[in-house]
Structures are given as structure tokens and as C-alpha cells.
């Protein structure tokens, strides 16, 4: 169960990296060509182009938000403003979402983050103005940053002590691998809206993952949701091929141990979680 769950979480990290590394592409700056007195074009900086009395042209092999909405010259400050809004508001939303996981559950909030991400992506691809684009990106960033915070806690609660560091390392390896794949795919992409389509296509199948993920046993125990806890532990035990009789005997023993000594019996969870 732990290995498969870790694999799924790594795949989510990989998919979400396609959102995390999109900003340099959707705000890609064009080349500026200053118009000379003889009518020819000469490559120049944005500052020189915007101050030229003869005007300028732009040249780019990629259609970005900057070129579509002319976010340069007197509108150039809007690029930094929009990027800041996406990252800062996304971070604030992620903080709020991750704090709710302590009350509503890790699995539930991971699912909420996923739904928020997909809603944001659908808004960005269907919008026809810059405001809609920013709102959609804030929502999708909220989802990936919220997930990034919650999943580390989630894995630390279900993985064995010897596997926690490895699990966290594999998450970031998956993120890095996603960055490489995203940059390779962008070689053939010429329009920023195509990036949003790719993001939807790679993230849509993740809904199947949430049908397998189980709530953190430690969270359920702390919330005293014993019925849900037993259901989750039995599911995990079955996935790890632990005989039902042994599992029930171990659970009864640990409950009695916790009651008599006041200790957190989930510290011993590896006994029935591992195969």
C-alpha cells in the first residue's frame, strides 16, 4: 500500500510541475525591433524600442500573454504585478487549505486541492481576457501549492520510519523530472493556451488516484474516528496481504496497550502496515 501510494503521489507531483513551471512561458517576452530611418528593423532593447520616435515591431516564435495583451512599454509593470499576484495569492490560499487538513483530513483536502487546480485550468482555457487568466492561474497555483504542503505530512503519517526520507526525496525527484518533460514538450508548443490544454490532459486522469488513496490512520486516530480508522487499517492490511485474523489481533492488542499506558499505539503501526 505504501509503495503504491508513494508512486501515485509522485505522479501527482510530476503532473503539477507542469503548472509550477509555466510562468516563464506564458509571460514570455518577444524580441524588439527598432524601425530605422531607412525603414529597416534593428534588434534593440525594450527600453530603446519604447522610446523610439520611429516606432518598433516585435518578433517572437511563441504567442504569450505579453504579446497578446501588449504587456510591454508602459504596460510592462503589469507582468511583474500579475506574476506576483499568482504566486502570492496562490501561496496564501495554499496556507489556508493546508491548515484545513488538520480538521477535515489529509485525503479530503488533497482532493479539494485537485478540484481547485482543475477549476483553475478550465477557467484559464475558457477565458478571453487577462483578468480571467489571472483568476484561473491563482486557483490552479493554490491547488498545487496546497497539495505540495499536505502530501508531505500525509506521507510522513503513512510511511514507515525508514521510508520517510526516501519518500520526500522521490517527491522532489518527480517534480524535477516533470520540469524536464515540460521543457521538452514546450519545444513544439507555439501558443500559451496550448500549455493550458497540456496541463488539463496530464492532470485529468489523476482523479482515478483519489479512488485508491486512504485517509491517514494517524489523523483518524487523533480525531477519534475509530470506525473510519478500522476501515482504513483493514483496507491497508488487505493491500499488504496481512491475514485478517492477525490484523484484528494486532489492532485489539494495540488498543489495549494504548488504553493501559496512554501511549500512541500508531507509533507501532509498521507491525500491521508492512507486508
Image (tube, helix red, strand yellow):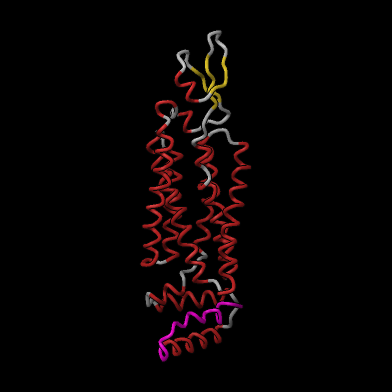
| Up-down relation of residue 149 to residue 118 (above or below) | below
Residue at position x 37%, y 37% in the image: 131
Decide whether residue 273 is among the magenta residues: yes
**Foreground residue, 42 or 235?**
42
* Residue 129 on image: x %, y %: 40, 33
User: Is 151 situated above or below 54?
Assistant: below
Which of the 4 quarters of the picture holds residue 241? bottom right
Q: Is residue 118 or residue 271 the one in the foreground? A: 271
Q: Is residue 100 left or right of residue 162?
A: left
The answer to whether residue 180 is above or below residue 174 is above
Horizontal side, residue 189 vs residue 91: left or right: right
Q: Quadrant of residue 122?
A: top left
At horizontal 41% and vertical 57% (from top left) the residue drawn is 112
| For residue 196, side relative to residue 91 (left or right) | right
Residue 127 on the magenta span:
no
Query: Which residue is drawn at the image coordinates 40% and 79% (left, top)?
Result: 226
x then y, percent, for residue 178: 59, 50
Q: Which of the pair 19/121 is nearer the observer? A: 19
> Can you say which quadrant of the picture contains the N terminus?
bottom right
Q: Quadrant of the C terminus?
A: bottom right
Q: How many marks?
A: 0
For the magenta stretch, what is the residue range? 259-275
How far from the left and from the top, in percent, is residue 78? 40, 34
Residue at image x 41%, y 39%? 82
- Predominant secondary structure in magenta? helix
Q: Position of residue 270 (x, y in %)?
A: 55, 79
Residue 6: which quarter of the image? bottom right
Most extreme residue toward the top is 38
Amino acid at each position: 500500500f505504501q509503495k503504491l501510494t508513494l508512486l501515485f503521489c509522485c505522479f501527482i507531483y510530476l503532473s503539477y510541475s507542469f503548472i509550477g513551471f509555466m510562468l516563464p512561458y506564458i509571460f514570455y517576452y518577444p524580441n524588439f525591433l527598432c524601425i530605422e530611418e531607412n525603414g529597416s528593423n534593428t534588434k534593440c532593447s525594450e527600453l530603446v524600442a519604447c522610446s523610439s520616435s520611429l516606432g518598433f515591431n516585435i518578433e517572437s516564435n511563441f504567442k504569450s500573454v505579453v504579446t497578446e495583451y501588449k504587456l510591454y512599454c508602459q504596460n510592462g509593470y503589469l507582468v511583474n504585478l500579475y506574476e506576483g499576484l499568482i504566486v502570492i495569492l496562490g501561496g496564501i490560499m495554499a496556507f489556508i487549505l493546508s491548515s484545513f487538513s488538520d480538521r477535515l483530513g489529509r485525503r479530503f483536502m488533497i482532493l479539494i486541492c485537485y478540484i481547485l487546480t482543475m477549476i483553475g485550468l478550465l477557467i484559464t482555457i475558457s477565458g478571453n481576457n487577462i483578468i480571467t487568466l489571472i483568476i484561473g492561474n491563482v486557483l490552479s497555483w493554490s491547488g498545487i501549492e496546497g497539495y505540495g504542503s499536505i502530501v508531505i505530512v500525509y506521507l510522513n503519517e503513512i510511511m514507515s520510519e525508514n521510508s520517510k526520507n526516501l519518500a520526500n526525496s522521490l517527491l522532489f525527484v518527480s517534480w524535477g523530472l516533470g520540469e524536464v518533460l515540460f521543457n521538452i514538450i514546450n519545444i513544439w508548443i507555439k501558443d500559451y493556451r496550448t500549455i493550458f490544454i497540456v496541463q488539463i490532459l496530464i492532470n485529468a486522469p489523476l482523479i482515478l488516484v483519489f479512488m485508491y488513496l486512504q485517509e491517514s490512520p494517524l489523523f483518524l486516530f487523533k480525531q477519534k474516528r475509530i470506525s473510519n480508522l478500522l476501515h482504513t487499517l483493514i483496507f491497508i492490511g488487505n493491500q499488504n496481504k496481512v491475514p485478517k485474523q492477525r490484523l484484528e489481533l494486532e489492532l485489539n492488542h494495540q488498543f489495549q496497550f494504548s488504553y493501559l499506558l496512554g501511549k500512541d499505539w500508531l507509533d507501532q503501526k509498521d507491525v500491521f502496515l508492512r507486508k
